[in-house]
Image: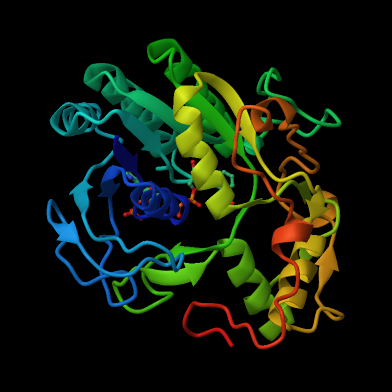
Amino acid sequence: MKILVVGGSGFLGWEVVRVGLAAGHDVVATYYGNPVRGGAVGGGAVGGGAVGGGAPGGGAGAVGVEWRRVDVRSREGTVALGTAVRPDVIVNAAYRQSDWATTAAGGAHVGLAAAAAGARLVHVSSDVVFSGAAPSYDETALPDPITPYGAAKAAAETAIAAMAPDAAIVRTSLIVGPGLVGPGLVGPGVVGEGESQHERFLHRLAADPSRGVLFTDDIRCPVHVTDLASALLELAAHPGVHHVAGPDAVSRHELGVLIGRRDGVPTDHLPTGRRAELGPPAPLDVRLDCTATQAKLTTRLRGARTFLAPRPPGERPHWPGRR
Ligand SMILES: NC(=O)c1ccc[n+]([C@@H]2O[C@H](COP(=O)([O-])OP(=O)(O)OC[C@H]3O[C@@H](n4cnc5c(N)ncnc54)[C@H](OP(=O)(O)O)[C@@H]3O)[C@@H](O)[C@H]2O)c1
């Protein structure tokens, strides 16, 4: 199968690349501002060339990935990419949280590209399309966003469902695990091995508690990045709306404690707070019910309390810079 990963240079997109390669698929991946290069990921050319080297997930190498640059804000450029690559499946993991043109219009443009190329689209959406007013949300729930980011994700879902009715629209929650991190975190202008934004935040906060707080009233259902990437590829065969998140609903504080305990970081003095009092307006408690989606998957969606279990003594994380 030929897979086009739009946003392959991002945290989730890279894991989709890695899982797709490991499964023996042909993978074409895109970047926008951050070409994937540097020792941690592979030193090959980017921009139509093949990139070789190891993968952040520690599994299959990235040999054979063809990289292309695309700006999903461009309708013509995005459709031209689809018709040039002619993939069987497009996975869209591209977004920019504060940018409607990328997240909403860009999602629609990838939908057009899938329709033009005759490809199945797997579009990554988010639990942020929900307000949190309901106790939980299953796959039939309609979006009721309360933030601009949530509105942009909901708009993309609506446009894609209209123009690519065979698309799989996959809402997910906080994504945790090893993967690509952007330039500046590994080295100037270099994208390389790292860990999720949630793990990096915990380690920054543990080192300097003045850098923020962990909310005790902000509840989500974190998912492991490899579980999510595997599920996305499986769901290419299942049109419709799907929910892919872990079964454990945890607060940002509990998530931080789980990460800290796994990594041997003291968690007793992590600063806490309540989003309802301190944070900008955002959904507080959003729990995705994934029962119907899990029944379609062979991938088992693990909960945070499982995939963040403390490491056995002596086992080290595989990424550089963390001890
Ligand atoms: N991370 C989470 O906890 C979380 C939670 C819920 C849902 N999600 C969803 O998961 C998806 C992936 O998130 P992520 O954390 O992996 O994001 P990320 O690491 O920030 O990656 C974003 C990707 O989008 C690309 N991109 C940005 N602007 C673009 C443009 N104008 N044209 C083309 N590509 C562009 C980036 O390319 P460059 O870096 O090369 O510019 C990068 O490959 C998103 O749909 C997000 O809403 C994430």
Residue 158 in sight = yes
- Residue 271 rendering spot, x and y as whole percentages: 81, 73
Decide: is 203 above or below 87: below
For image coordinates 44% across by 41% down, the residue present is: 99
- Residue 199 rendering spot, x and y as whole percentages: 62, 68
For image coordinates 65% across by 23% down, the residue present is: 143
Q: Is residue 273 left or right of residue 13?
A: right
Residue 41: name its quadrant.
bottom left
Decide: is 206 above or below 305: below
**Across the whole image, how many numbered discs are drawn on residues?**
0
Closest to the observer, 168 or 163: 168
- Residue 91 rendering spot, x and y as whole percentages: 39, 36
Decide: is 311 above or below 167: below
For image coordinates 65% across by 77% down, the residue present is: 203
Closest to the observer, 149 or 297: 297
Residue 196: name its quadrant.
bottom right
- Residue 218 rendering spot, x and y as whole percentages: 79, 50
Closest to the observer, 128 or 100: 128
Q: Is residue 241 left or right of residue 38?
A: right
**Quadrant of the snapshot with the N terminus:** top left
Residue 208 in sight = no
**Quadrant of the snapshot with the C terminus:** bottom right
Decide: is 212 above or below 50: below
Q: Is residue 316 left or right of residue 94?
A: right
For image coordinates 27% across by 47% down, the residue present is: 30
